[in-house]
């Protein structure tokens, strides 16, 4: 009975199968030559894929972007060919009900090649990712090269200026000579930054000596500019920097720097020659060699207005140094040498400003002026403006601004009435 039932079941399954009329020669079991041709094409494509993969590996050592890109395209092309063969086989050879041993062997080989194909696809994706990373590294290296070239050009320009003697500058100041080549807005901007640092540097010993002499720094800061709201007590140092700045830049717009000169008429070339002559000199050596020079007189006059006599008396217990300066001398004390560095930076900035045609224009910012990001820059960088707050206003100017050609070098200011992030 069991044998009869099994036979009936087999007959019913056979009767339920759908019959697809197809040419006998397209059936895989009936046409082994066609199947062998298909498998042969698959093996050929696999060999080509292996060759392309080897080329892709070789292009990485040494790294060659062009060869990598060409090999990558070749690998992708071979993968597409294999994919097309797979779809062709599935469309023209539906899965047979009964599989012969020969078909099983071919199916196993095809499955093996498909597994290998997936492995190559993973490797291709890996190499594509490495290519993208290498491209990113190349972009970064190109940026670093560009920055290095810019620094190199700047250093070459500085070295050229440092290597100039007075005679060389005179010979190069003619038409289309060194004068027109080296005089640039970048050179002036660098001089502005140096002058600002010099103001900051001189304020340190000045404040330290005031502390040592027992000065009330809060009262001193308030006397310079009263009723300023400081975000932090340490910010009162900007009051002393402002004091130094205001006095050092008096007369800056005048070619004579508001000094009485025997021969006030000077050319643009002579201003630049004076800048070059003093640029690399120690200011103490400069005033030591020519104490009555224009630069020497400038240092003496500015010292007397920056350092008040009451301040100096409290520092040294007498006015001997002041009297020595008033008499035309240049003392070799550490305090006066610190001042000479400040004076040199402001003097060089003045000589350079009047070397341009037209001359660089200076502008100053008054207290309570509304802050403008175009013309001003805050010395405190982490200030906060909350919604609803009034626009910040200038409390102190610690460095003036400049117009040079069609551009602006911002004035450095301390803003009042703003909050500072901790």
Image (cartoon, grey):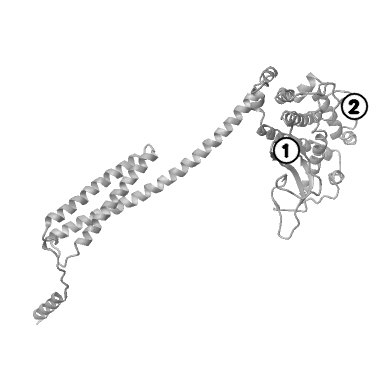
Image point (13%, 63%), residue name: 23
Q: Which mark lies nearer to you, 2 or 1?
A: 1
Image point (82%, 49%), residue name: 228
Q: Quadrant of the N terminus?
A: bottom left
Quarter of the image for residue 182 reads top right
Give the secondary structure at mark 2. Answer: helix
At label 1, counting other C-alpha atoms closer than 10 Å, the crowd grade (few under 14, some 14-19, many 20 or more) is some
In this view, 63 is above or below 79 = above
Q: Position of residue 283 (x, y in %)?
A: 76, 25
Q: Which residue is mark 1?
A: 403
Q: Is residue 208 among what the camera can see?
A: no
In this view, 109 is above or below 21 = above
In the shown orientation, is residue 318 left or right of residue 242? right
Q: Residue furthest bottom?
A: 1
Q: Is residue 338 among what the camera can see?
A: yes
Q: Position of residue 153 (x, y in %)?
A: 58, 30
Q: Nearer the viewer, residue 8 or 31?
A: 31
Q: Are marks 2 and 1 in contact (CB under 8 Å)?
A: no
Q: Position of residue 356 (x, y in %)?
A: 71, 30
Q: Nearer the viewer, residue 372 or 387?
A: 372
Give the secondary structure at mark 1. Answer: strand
Quarter of the image for residue 284 reads top right
Q: Which numbered disc, 2 or 1, marks the residue that appears first in the sequence?
A: 2
In the shown orientation, is residue 11 left or right of residue 360? left
Image point (55%, 34%), residue name: 148
The alpha-carbon separation of the residues under discs 2 and 1 comes to 38 Å
Q: Which mark is residue 323?
A: 2
């Amino acid at each position: 009975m069991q044998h009869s039932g099994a036979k009936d079941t087999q007959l019913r399954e056979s009767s339920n199968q759908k019959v697809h009329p197809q040419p006998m020669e397209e059936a895989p079991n009936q046409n082994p030559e066609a199947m062998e041709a298909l498998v042969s094409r698959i093996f050929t494509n696999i060999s080509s894929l292996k060759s392309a993969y080897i080329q892709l590996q070789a292009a990485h050592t040494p790294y060659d972007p062009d060869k990598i890109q060409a090999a990558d395209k070749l690998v992708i092309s071979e993968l597409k060919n294999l994919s097309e063969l797979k779809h062709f086989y599935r469309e023209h050879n539906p899965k047979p009900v009964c599989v012969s041993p020969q078909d099983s062997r071919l199916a196993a080989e095809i499955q093996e090649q498909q597994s290998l194909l997936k492995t190559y696809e993973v490797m291709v994706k890996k190499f594509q990712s490495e290519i993208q990373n290498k491209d990113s590294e190349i972009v970064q290296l190109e940026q670093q090269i560009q920055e290095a070239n810019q620094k190199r050009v700047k250093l070459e320009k500085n070295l050229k200026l440092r290597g100039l003697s007075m005679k060389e500058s005179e010979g190069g100041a003619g038409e289309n000579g060194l004068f027109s080549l080296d005089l640039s807005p970048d050179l002036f901007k660098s001089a502005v930054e140096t002058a600002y640092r010099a103001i900051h540097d001189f304020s340190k010993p000045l404040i330290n000596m005031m502390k040592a002499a027992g000065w009330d720094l809060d009262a001193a800061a308030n006397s310079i500019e009263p009723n300023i709201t400081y975000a932090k007590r340490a910010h009162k140092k900007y009051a002393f920097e402002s004091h130094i700045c205001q006095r050092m830049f008096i007369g800056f717009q005048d070619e004579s720097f508001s000094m009485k000169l025997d021969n006030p008429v000077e050319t643009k070339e002579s201003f630049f020659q004076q800048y070059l002559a003093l640029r690399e000199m120690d200011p103490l050596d400069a005033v030591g060699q020519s104490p009555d020079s224009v630069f020497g007189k400038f240092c003496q006059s500015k010292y007397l207005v920056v350092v008040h006599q009451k301040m100096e008396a409290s520092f040294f217990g007498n006015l001997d140094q002041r009297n020595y300066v008033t008499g035309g001398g240049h003392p070799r004390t550490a305090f006066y040498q610190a001042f000479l560095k400040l004076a040199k930076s402001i003097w060089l900035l003045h000589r350079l400003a009047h070397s341009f045609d037209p001359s660089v224009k200076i502008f100053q910012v008054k207290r309570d002026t509304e802050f403008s990001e175009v013309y001003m820059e805050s010395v405190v960088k982490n200030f906060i403006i909350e919604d609803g707050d009034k626009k910040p206003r200038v409390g102190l100017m610690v460095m003036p601004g400049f117009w040079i050609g069609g551009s602006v070098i911002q004035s450095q200011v301390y803003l009042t009435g703003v909050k500072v992030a901790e």
